[in-house]
Amino acid sequence: MVMAVIPTNGDKSMGTGILLKREYPDPRMLPAQPSWQQLRPQLALSELIPGQYVSTTAKIAYVKTSERTDPLGTKLVFTGVLEDSTFKAPFVSHRISYPLIRNSVYKFNSAYVHEFEDKSLLLVVTENTKIESKNVEDYREFVWTPKIESIKRPVHYVALQGVITTVHSNSGLIKRCNKCKSILNDSCPNNCNIGWGWDLRVSSRLYDGSGSIKMILTKDIASKVLQKSLSELILLSSQPLPSTTTNLFQTSICSIKIPDSIEVVEAVSEYVSSYRKSGKLIITDGSNLAYLPTNEEHQFSDFSTKLLRATEPEDMKIIRRLIEKALELGIKKVTCHQRMHGIFLLEEPISLYRCEKARLYLGFSARINVQQSGATIEWTPQAYVRESVLDYVQLRREKGASASAITRFLTTYRNRVIVAPTGNYGSIVEVIMRKAGDQKVSDNDTRNLLEFWKQIYDIDISPDEIPLLRVKIVNSEATFTYPPSMCFFAGGDSLVIPAGVQKFIENKKSTLKTRMDEVAGKAIHDLRIGDLSLGSDAEITEQQPDLQTQLLQETR
């Protein structure tokens, strides 16, 4: 559970911080109230219209007495928070003669909706607003259970529950300007030139099935999550790290040179996605263009040569994707294992004892940073505990669960999944009682799921897999149909891992670094695009440990 404060408009984001003070709206500046013969719209809190007098019925979630100052001196007002089943909104009531009681429901007739610069709202109860107390038998219609999708405006103190899908690189121990409080990379973006100080934060993205939201954990909460105080980290940052480190997930790096230009084939086809099978070096632009070293293997009828220049940003995107694809092919050639959950597996998944039917996936990730002068590849060991939905369904069936019970569980209690082979997060929105061999990809694509997964990802799917899952992918409005063997529950999210199993996992992790470096060295040595060799002179080196990098890896 994560406490959230003040999401911004547009790109939804939230942070745990101090409530910002707002400019109090002067009652004398409010527009004149319309005559009582004119109807006021009866609106829910999520439907409030800025700049209008409206009527609404809501519960008093919080109320206190405050003092305000005007030309006649000080006056008392009620301030607090209103709540209904759709939203929360702060309010100020100038009718101090009408007492408002916490957790009671009132109807406010002709209250003014004030909008601040950040698009947040304030309901202003004036002396002409009529207030009616309501007797309510069922208070559930005045309790808001927030979902990220329903947060349309900034709102204070919202509790959300979800999965952290991304931890951004500006997390951990950071440098902050002493004046403008901006995060510093090399220098202050506002050129304050006053100096800087250390700070601790975690910048991430939270996903709850309905949508995602940017989340900032400030110093106090980040310290609790990392179990390290800011003063402890500042002390460590002033001391050199020892040459030996207990961090089992130490990163290795290597650099490769990129020539000024690379000649490739640019082909046009209506079905370029059909050529993305993992055994071939070919990439697509997402529509009808494909890029490949030569046309001999694919025999495109509409193609031409294209010179990719390292100085052109669009060409660099193609070069990066070609390098990523070539590297993936080289790693698979060495390990003879598929890419799964966004990592390259070093061995077959290991079944775990007393952990339902979960398996341990051991491997590493490879992150490529491409620049005009060359590319840097960062290698990091990874170990994930995952249980496929197919195994979970079979386990429940062995215990005697009905199809309806499994469907209800998958769409409510265990609907957050990780999809293969990318490792993206998603939410199950529908369970389809149909076998994978009988399911077409789409109305425009007549292939069934077996053919699709074999041609696109070179992964074999059983034709008898059931049920199929409609999954909404995080940070996207797209919904796709997945076979249950390619959707997974994550360890620590919905799986309880016994202490003995956790110790076994840690022991397996300790062997990953050496194995990863051996595979990376072979894959880099054979890295090529057509006849162009890129990694023959590259060497795998151990990244020198620094506190900021180590803390970021630990946070992730």
Image (cartoon, rainbow, N blue to C red):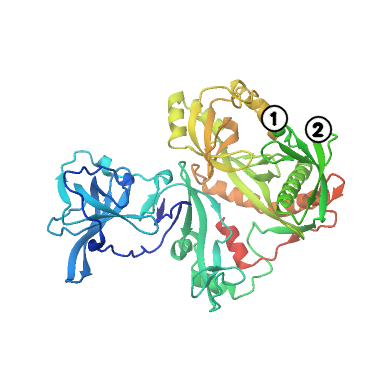
Callout count:
2
Residue at mark 2: 298
Crowding around mark 1 (Cα neighbors within 10 Å: few <14, some 14 to 19, many 20+) is some
Q: What element carries label 2?
A: loop
Residue at mark 1: 454
Residue at the (15%, 42%) spot, across then down: 135
Say which of 361 and 126 sits in front: 126
Left or right: residue 132 compared with residue 349: left
Q: Which amino acid does label 2 sit on?
A: His
Examine the rendered structure and indicate whether residue 371 appears above or below residue 278.
below
Q: Which amino acid does label 1 sit on?
A: Lys
Q: Where is residue 276 in the image (x, y as percent from the top left)?
A: 72, 36
Examine the rendered structure and indicate whether residue 272 appears above or below residue 493.
above
Residue at the (65%, 26%) spot, across then down: 450
Gap between marks 1 and 2 measured at Cα: 17 Å
Say which of 18 and 490 sits in front: 18
Q: Where is residue 52 in the image (x, y as percent from the top left)?
A: 28, 50
Examine the rendered structure and indicate whether residue 389 appears above or below residue 433.
below
